Amino acid sequence: VTIDINQFWNLFTESRLASPGQIQTLFSECDVQSSASQSPESLAKWIVNRGALSSYQADILLAGHHGPFKYGRYSVIEKMSDGPLAGCFSARDQKTGYGVILKFVPGKSVDDLELWNRIESRCDKISAAAGSAVASTSPSLLAFLNPVFEAVVLPRHRFVVSAAPAGKSVDRLPRKSRLPWLQACAVMAQAAKGLQAIHERGLLHGGISESSVWTQPGGEVRLLMDPSAAECGFASQAKSVQFGQLACLAPEVDVPVGPKEKLPLTPSAEVYSIG
């Protein structure tokens, strides 16, 4: 879809990503910036550089759509294209102002109520596990499990909301700055605390790898878990098992041969993966 500059302004207004006053101010400032109004693309880039749109939001407007950008109380900011959170969306909780991560159930699975019930049950248990860790009087249990806030059902969408992790996942650390072995052991010992909180709720993580372990700016560690990645104690199908996960699998865990076969996991196998 090809749009002109006037259509872009109209879509920007209809999106409600900015107030009418903010849009009018941008329009007035852009009017004296001749280079910004040469094309919809240059205009979008100028507005992104001003911080009034994200790159993802601009791409949606340039494609001829005014959204949607708001799902319930959550406003989508950016789509993550690489790293451990690829395919997820960074968003802002309009009620609290906090940054969150949204993981949508694929369109073909939206109407699978049995699948959604399993995901919702896992979300409730993970949320309880994270809450008990934060409420614990033992400092060693603080902030080791990345919080999962809720599973949301809308008329046309279903998604899981979790806290936006700070810092970096272990697999994203520069090769030249790999952790010394003693520090690496301390990091994974903290991740094991988060895994313990999951196991105590009768759940399995389902995807232990370097990408699920995040080091925070203050030195704390959080274990990330995707509630939709594994249900009923089994990992996802073979096509969704990433290379990093294969490298961490316990030797007794067999890689599935057929598309309908699943990886049998146990708590002890996941402890091996942490090691």
Image: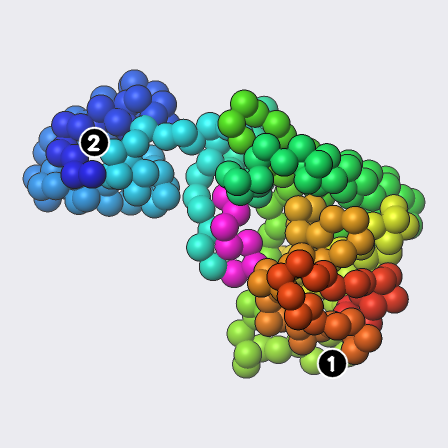
Residue on which disc 2 sits: 8
In the picture provided, is 237 more to the left or to the right than 42? right
Residue at 43% in and 44% down: 78
Between 128 and 265, the one nearer to me in the picture: 265
Residue at 67% in and 36% down: 116
Q: Distance between the residues labelled 2 and 1?
A: 53 Å
Please say whether residue 221 is one of the residues in the magenta stretch: no
Residue on which disc 1 sits: 181
Segment tinted magenta in the rendering: 83-89
- Residue 135 falls in image quadrant: top right
Please say whether residue 87 is one of the residues in the magenta stretch: yes
In the picture provided, is 143 more to the left or to the right than 106? right
- Which of the two labelled residues, at mark 2 and mark 1, occupies the earlier sequence position? 2
**Judging from the image, what secondary structure is the residue with disc 1 in?**
helix
Between 173 and 205, the one nearer to me in the picture: 205
Magenta segment, principal secondary structure? Answer: loop
Residue 176 in the image: above or below residue 194:
below
Expressed as whole percent of the image width and height from the top left, the position of residue 4 reads 13, 34
